[in-house]
Amino acid sequence: MKLNELKAPKNSRKKKKRLGRGSSSGHGGTSGKGHKGQKSRSGYKRKAGYEGGQMPLQRRIPKFGFTNIFRKEFQIVNLEQLEKFSEGETINKDSLIKSGIIKKKRLDLKILGRGEITKPLTVEADAFSKSAVEKITRTGGKAVRL
């Protein structure tokens, strides 16, 4: 259902407002639009944020903050998430995508040290935290930085 398809119910006594049909109708002359001015003209549209020439709100309020263009964005994986892999397995972006731990191949991968790891694994990633490298090597695995 659309707005232009709306109709009054069949038994409705309310009549449709007929604009511009003479002064006796109560909606003649200016058809309820007031007198003259931009809003009374056909095809009138107000631009979003326009305040009649007053400085608009989005320009009155000060700007703040900044975006660092050199920011490096990582997909983060904790060691506790690597526990599901079998012993001696090589873990890289492809194997993590297959297992559903990460979703995007284009973003860099960083391994963080939350949780414990009990099996020796070879982990290939773009970055590691110190605690993650320490825990991986302690179990006899390797942390390979790409």
Image (cartoon, rainbow, N blue to C red):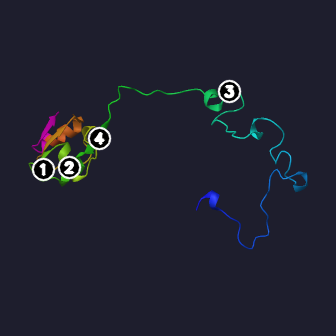
Which label sits in the foreground, 4 or 2? 4
**What segment carries the magenta color?**
137-146
Determine if the magenta segment contains residue 103.
no
> Where is residue 40, by image quadrant?
top right
Q: Point out residue 39 in the picture as x, y percentages from the top left corner.
A: 75, 39
Q: CA distance from mark 1 to mark 2?
A: 9 Å
Relative image position of residue 100 (x, y in whole percent): 25, 52
Q: Nearer the viewer, residue 113 or 123?
A: 123
Amino acid on which the number 1 mark rests in the picture = Lys
Return the x and y of residue 101 as percentages of the image width and height: 26, 50
Task: Name which of mark 3 and mark 1 comes first in the sequence.
Answer: 3
Q: Secondary structure at mark 4?
A: strand
Q: Which numbered disc covers residue 55?
A: 3
Question: Around disc 1, counting alpha carbons within 10 Å, would you say few (fewer than 14), some (14 to 19), or many (20 or more)?
Answer: some
The circle drawn on residue 119 is: 1
* Sequence-first disc among 2 and 3: 3
| SS class, disc 1 | loop
Q: CA distance from mark 3 to mark 1?
A: 64 Å
Q: Amino acid at mark 4?
A: Gln
Report whether residue 38 is seen.
Answer: yes
Q: Secondary structure at mark 3?
A: loop
Q: Quadrant of the N terminus?
A: bottom right
Q: In the rendered structure, find residue 75 and report the number of the disc placed on it.
A: 4
Q: Which residue is mark 2?
A: 82
